[in-house]
Image (cartoon, helix red, strand yellow):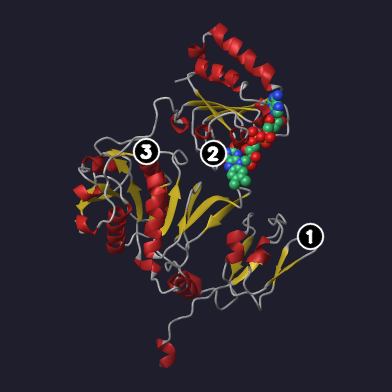
Amino acid sequence: MEEKLKKKKKPRGKALLIQGKCIACGAKCQAACPTDAVEMSESGEPIFEDAKCIGCRKCIKVCPADAIEIIFPPGEAAIPSEIESESLSDEEETELKKGGVDVLAWKGVWVFVEQTDGVAHSVSWELLGVGRTLAQDLGVELSAFILGSNIKALADEAFGYGAEKVYLMDDPILSHYRTEPYLHGSISLIRKCKPEIVLMGATGLGRDLAGAVATELNTGLTADCTGLTIDKKMRLLEQTRPAFGGNIMATILTETARPQMASVRPHVMSKQDFMPGRKGETIIEPFTLPEREVTTKVLEVINLVSESSVDISAANIIVSGGRGMLNADNFKLLQNLADLLGGVVGCSRSAVDAGWISPDRQVGQTGKTVKPKLYIACGISGAIQHLVGMQNADYIIAINKDKTAPIFEVAHLGIVGDVFQIVPVIIEQLKERGAKSMVCE
Ligand SMILES: Cc1cc2nc3c(=O)[nH]c(=O)nc-3n(C[C@H](O)[C@H](O)[C@H](O)COP(=O)(O)OP(=O)(O)OC[C@H]3O[C@@H](n4cnc5c(N)ncnc54)[C@H](O)[C@@H]3O)c2cc1C
């Protein structure tokens, strides 16, 4: 009787190599195995020891060739179909609840819509673009949350960019950004509604707020992500970003805390097309922190952006120079080309470090992320720290005298040669043919 009442133990199965699929990647499965159940053969293929394998599937997740499957010993084989609808095993469920947080109670993808004077930062709409994919993969709602004063009109914009729900906190105290009131508003919303994922722009404001929110909620935050995907089985956000000085790409998980928080720089993700007239549900939430409890006061707002400064991250055409330009004077050549094309001049960090050009023109990990229609890289080798800032450009032309330069791996058109011979010829041709007629809008 007691036996009957016992919960049926879910079978885990055993890992098995699918013959002919292993690519001998370097023992990733062995490294991932928590029970030392994997030995490597001389040819670099795994041999699984059934007695030790607990069917945790970690080897399957890391296998780059989908070369491992789970098999069920006779007797267990009938059980999987009965429990097929259950998405998580007991152990996986326990794992998700460890750390004292019932992560399964958190649902939905939220995007913070950053605004200044009622105008949204475009990174918010880019985040709704990637947020839509994440929400679809999880089968949950995509929501936006907006804090500010007189910001109701932004809700319609958020619906147009894909939000299904918009949470609004509209209060004069929120008219200028200050950490305390924005933190108070954000965490009260997040604690109440429990979204499993919260995305923010990696802007000055977003970096400040995201860090404060994550600290207050005692959760993880991955800053400056370049990729966001979902591990559907474990319902985890896979947050990819450059690590160790950009030499590797790390995928980071927030396994035992909620929400999973990530920030993304402007121009890294793509916006969805705006759908005018699209509607959703607006939820107005009260803001409860009185002004007297806010320790910072805004006395004056001074806009430091001078008229002569150029926002390379918004440019459609960028002509960028690196160490191969040899000196500051040679950047005039790139300025000529950029002027003819109606673009701006960018650069690598080496050019900034050499003092040839100002830091606001730097493209890359510690500079700006750009997504122009055309990016022309002149005398730039293509270090990973540079590539992460420009590889999403629609069309990349690279000019480099070293045919093995990594920039050619991301270039759509590679020109192996001397930049001082090639750029003047391009300029001459553009002048002859009429540059404007050659450049697509
Ligand atoms: C934490 C960290 C963050 C970083 N952040 C950034 C960043 O944001 N942005 C960034 O750019 N870098 C960044 N870097 C630096 C990065 O690692 C590289 O050192 C840098 O991008 C190299 O710049 P470069 O390509 O101009 O110079 P180099 O690597 O020296 O390449 C110069 C290239 O010019 C070519 N060349 C030379 N003469 C000519 C010629 N006459 N005609 C054609 N080609 C020629 C050469 O073949 C060579 O490929 C960062 C590094 C670290 C550690």
Looking at the image, residue 435 lies above or below residue 31: above
Marks 1 and 2 sit apart, C-alpha to C-alpha, by 39 Å
Residue ID for mark 1:
43
Q: Residue furthest front?
A: 299
Q: Is mark 1 within 8 Å of ligand 1?
A: no
**Could you tell me if the residues under marks 1 and 2 are in contact, i.e. CB atoms within 8 Å?**
no
Q: Position of residue 259 (x, y in %)?
A: 39, 61
Considering the numbered disc 1 on the image, is that residue within a helix, a strand or a loop? loop
Marks 3 and 2 sit apart, C-alpha to C-alpha, by 17 Å
**Crowding at label 3, few (<14), some or many (≥20) Cα neighbours within 10 Å?**
some
Q: Can you say which quadrant of the picture contains the N terminus?
A: bottom left
**In the depicted view, which residue is nearer to us: 181 or 128?**
181
Three-letter code for the amino acid on which mark 2 is drawn: Gly
137 vs 120, left or right, is right
Residue ID for mark 3:
122
389 vs 187, left or right, is right
Q: Residue at x 49, y 75 (%)?
A: 91
Q: Residue at x 55, y 76 (%)?
A: 76
**In the depicted view, which residue is nearer to us: 281 or 301?**
301
**Mark in the foreground, 1 or 2:** 2
N-terminal of the two: label 1 or label 2? 1
Q: Residue at x 66, y 79 (%)?
A: 51
Three-letter code for the amino acid on which mark 3 is drawn: Ser
Considering the numbered disc 3 on the image, is that residue within a helix, a strand or a loop? helix
The disc at residue 389 is: 2
